[in-house]
Image (cartoon, rainbow, N blue to C red):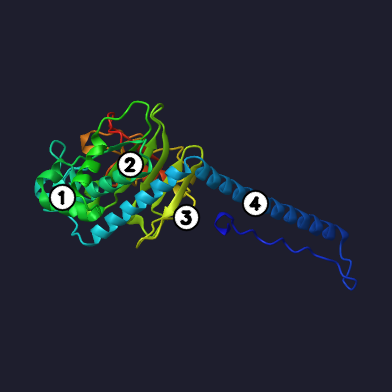
Amino acid sequence: SHQHCRRVSPPMPVRLMTASAAPGDAAADAEGAAADKEAMRENAKSAAAAIQEAVRKAELKDAMERYYGREASMAVALVNRAMNLCADLAKTMTAVDSDSPGTDMSTDQAVDGLSAIKAGDSTPVTAADFAIQALVSDALLKFFPEDGFMGEEDAQDLRQDAGLRELTQRLSGMADADAMLAAIDRGVAPLEPGRRFWVLDPIDGTKGFLTGDQYIIGLALIDGDSGEPLVAAMGNPTLHPEPSMMVAVKGAGARQFMMGTEGDPAVPSSYEVRPTSWAEADYSHLPTQAPGADEPDPVEGTDFPPWLVSRPMTEGSPLPFGPRAPPGDVRYGALVKYWAVASGSHAAFVQYQQSLKTWD
């Protein structure tokens, strides 16, 4: 496929002597001929490398389809549908202003019929969270009935809030409200030991969704014995029309996708993840000392690698590159930071929290 091949430069022209040309200096001619041969060898190497790279990509594509191909296709389709649901709903929403730290929001920032603040942890949940969990749970039960399912949400708030329940049902497209509530609650039911299961974070960084920042839809298939992920997908709708979905399959690498809109499927992208200029910088002299009176502030990506942390600096966070090398500001939630590292924009993410939920 042309998507998996890069353009190869045409061979360098070889200088030829004609009958009417002057013989010239023999040494110069020999030097020119040697240069021509070297250029031809380099072009041959370049062409061979291009073919080898094309074969490698084709093999990865085949492997992705061979290992858990059906599951990977399902993950792509479901995350794409969830991304469209969020993008469509966001067009009708007014962004919420919030100065609360981290992922927290106050109760007065909840929007009637759209969102609520979870009791106990002060994080928001929206009709989109519930609708995504309902439609993903329902689809996986139909196509992979032997698999377990774990999701972040339960339907308690929907049973108490008619407006939130009605919007959730409309977004999910499920005609039966009771079936929708049951599909959501399936995510908190006990899992059968040894049985592989899907785990969903319908919107990681719901605060980002409400405030107009980045957020991630995360879905993975987990081996029930080893606990290892077999298939994993992340969708980042705010990046559309750039590549906004990553999908990885154990043993077959990862691919990026363009979000399909208006009912169209997601489209594989030929874009390759490559670290940006920070990866080429020299960090042999990190700014580890406290700032001096006449010293300029160090520059992220030039004087120290761009990095992220999951804890506000005011609460006492690590500074692996010294007191003058603060973390970048990527909000909200952990999966957005994982995306930043996987996409090459940041070198690392320090996950400060020691106890995490499975979907995080």
- Element carrying mark 3: loop
Residue at image position (32%, 47%) is 217
Q: CA distance from mark 2 to mark 4?
A: 42 Å
Among the two numbered marks 3 and 1 on one chain, the one whose residue lies closer to the N terminus: 1
- Element carrying mark 2: helix
Of the residues shown, which amino acid type is indicated by label 2?
A: Leu
Q: CA distance from mark 4 to mark 1?
A: 54 Å
Q: Nearer the viewer, residue 39 or 169?
A: 169
Please tell me the numbered disc located at residue 165.
1
Expressed as whole percent of the image width and height from the top left, the position of residue 317 reads 27, 34
Whether residues under marks 2 and 4 lie with C-beta atoms below 8 angstroms apart, the answer is: no
Q: Which residue is mark 4?
A: 51
Of the residues shown, which amino acid type is indicated by label 3?
A: Ser
Expressed as whole percent of the image width and height from the top left, the position of residue 265 reads 41, 57
Q: Which residue is mark 2?
A: 141
Among the two numbered marks 3 and 4 on one chain, the one whose residue lies closer to the N terminus: 4
Q: Nearer the viewer, residue 290 or 235?
A: 235
